[in-house]
């Protein structure tokens, strides 16, 4: 959707709200959407024990709970990467379809990521030593802030330099295809979510199982040990 002026070698601003290309939404609309995203994220995070993990019998959460929701967190960004890269809506610049896809994916991600964040907040206190709770919580939020900073810089780099032949490291030539740049950002987010969930497996918290409502997906380790002992007693 961007219009480039070859004589000036930069993108002509075609959006009334500012910026070049993309859906061309007004700044007020974009700001309102971002504000709604933040409100939705915060409310879901605070309601997670009552509306999600509680009804699913996943309270209090444990390591396996986080791995479970961490893997689910990969789906919105993975679907987004595939849709942005391969769907006709983004290839042909079908504005209405593009906006619908982005809104649905971003809202879905906000809900799932807020659930993960609520679980993180509980586990960081659970795993902290009794005499170092403040230090552990502070380190968690410091790492959180650093991760957001690196994510901002990394996504900016990917969006700029993905989707085109790098002929000139300066100017606007490298990131000649914003669609591919956006797909690369979503793919990087998917990989990051997967690695975060995968690394969690090494946390030493193997006693609790995982339930999903009335169904037991992974039995607690104590139950498994008792079952094995009973089987060994049988002739």
Image (tube, rainbow, N blue to C red):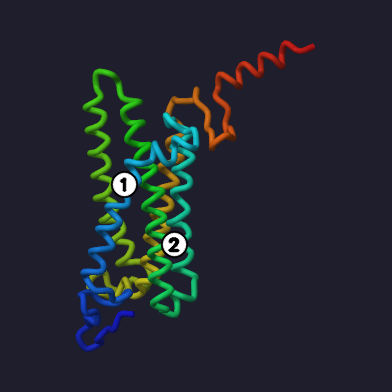
Q: Nearer the viewer, mark 2 or mark 1?
A: 1
Q: Give the Cα separation between the discs numbered 2 and 1.
A: 24 Å
Q: Residues within 10 Å of mark 1 (few under 14, many from 20)?
A: few
Q: Which mark is residue 43?
A: 1
Give the labeled residue for mark 2: 80
Secondary structure of the residue carrying tag 1 is: helix
In the displayed structure, would residue 21 be above or below residue 45?
below
Residue furthest right in the image: 235
Question: Quadrant where the N terminus lies?
Answer: bottom left
Residue 158: name its quadrant: bottom left
Question: Quadrant where the C terminus lies?
Answer: top right
The image shows residue 2 at horizontal and vertical percentages of 30, 80
Residue furthest bottom in the image: 7
Query: Which of the two residues, 150 or 16, is positioned nearer the viewer here?
Result: 16
Secondary structure of the residue carrying tag 2 is: helix
The image shows residue 86 at horizontal and vertical percentages of 49, 70
Query: Which of the two residues, 101 or 134, is positioned nearer the viewer here?
Result: 101
Nearer the N terminus, badge 2 or badge 1? Answer: 1
The answer to whether residue 196 is left or right of residue 29 is right
Q: Which residue corresponds to the image point at 27% horizontal and 53% vertical from the top-left?
A: 38
């Amino acid at each position: 959707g961007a219009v480039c002026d070859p004589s000036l070698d930069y993108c002509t601003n075609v959006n009334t709200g500012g910026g070049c290309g993309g859906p061309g939404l007004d700044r007020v609309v974009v700001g309102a959407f971002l504000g709604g995203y933040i409100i939705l994220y915060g409310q879901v995070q605070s309601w997670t024990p009552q509306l999600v993990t509680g009804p699913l019998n996943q309270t209090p959460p444990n390591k396996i709970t986080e791995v479970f929701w961490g893997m689910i967190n990969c789906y919105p960004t993975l679907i987004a990467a595939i849709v942005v890269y391969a769907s006709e809506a983004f290839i042909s610049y079908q504005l209405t379809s593009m906006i619908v896809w982005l809104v649905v994916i971003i809202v879905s991600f906000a809900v799932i990521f807020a659930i993960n964040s609520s679980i993180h907040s509980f586990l960081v206190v659970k795993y902290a030593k009794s005499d170092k709770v403040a230090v552990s919580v502070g380190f968690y939020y410091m790492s959180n802030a650093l991760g957001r900073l690196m994510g901002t810089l990394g996504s900016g780099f990917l969006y700029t330099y993905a989707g085109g032949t790098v002929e000139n490291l300066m100017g606007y030539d490298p990131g000649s295809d914003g669609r591919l740049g956006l797909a690369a950002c979503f793919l990087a987010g998917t990989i990051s979510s997967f690695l975060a969930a995968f690394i969690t497996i090494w946390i030493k918290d193997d006693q609790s199982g995982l339930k999903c409502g009335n169904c037991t997906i992974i039995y607690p380790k104590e139950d498994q040990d008792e079952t094995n002992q009973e089987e060994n007693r049988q002739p």
